[in-house]
Amino acid sequence: MASRPVRMDDVTVERVLRTVEVIPRGRVAAYGQIGAIVGIGPRLVGRIMSDWGSSVPWWRVTSSYGDIPAGLRGRALEQWEAEGIALKPNGLGCRMREYGADLDQLRRDAQAAWADLPD
């Protein structure tokens, strides 16, 4: 049985953006981690961030390896430096083990941030 595609509606977009907003300064979360909290896939998180993420701390969203997309890396690194996030030796991102957000806390903070949204 094929899974039903998730529709990108205003509530889903808002949940992703609010989740990104509550990632603590100096921490990052992967697209897939945010998707798991919101209940969508990582590609949809990436699409939402690409289309609507400029007003949230987008530089705190990485690949599962802690990497930032090449086209955003220069601007993200300025933010990371200000927040104390160090680059991995390969220069592509940060070490998730060191800078990854506490996912249980992020889930609680995200759900609190969505309290006024419809289910």
Image (spheres, rainbow, N blue to C red):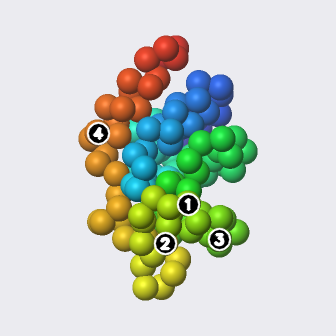
Q: Which element carries disc 1, helix, strand or loop?
A: helix
Which circle's residue, 3 or 1, is located before the other in the chain? 3
Alpha-carbon neighbours of circle 2 within 10 Å: few (<14), some, or many (≥20)? many
Q: Is residue 72 above or below residue 54?
A: below
Alpha-carbon neighbours of circle 3 within 10 Å: few (<14), some, or many (≥20)? few
Q: Which residue is the site of mark 2?
A: 93
Q: Which residue is the site of mark 3?
A: 74
- The residue nearer to you, when weighing 3 against 99, is 99
Residue 18 in picture, x, y percent from top left: 52, 33
Which circle's residue, 1 or 2, is located before the other in the chain? 1
What whole-number distance in Å separates the C-alpha atoms at marks 1 and 4?
22 Å
Q: Which residue is the site of mark 1?
A: 79
Image position of 58 (left or right of 110): right
Q: Which element carries disc 2, helix, strand or loop?
A: loop
Q: Which mark is residue 105?
A: 4
Q: Is residue 44 above or below residue 75?
A: above
What whole-number distance in Å separates the C-alpha atoms at marks 1 and 2?
12 Å
Q: Is residue 18 visible?
A: yes
Residue 78 in picture, x, y percent from top left: 58, 66
Image position of 3 (left or right of 51): left
Q: Is residue 82 above or below residue 19?
A: below
Which circle's residue, 3 or 2, is located before the other in the chain? 3
- Residue at image x 66%, y 41%? 55
- Residue at image x 69%, y 50%? 50
Q: Nearer the viewer, mark 1 or mark 2?
A: 1
What whole-number distance in Å separates the C-alpha atoms at marks 2 and 4?
23 Å
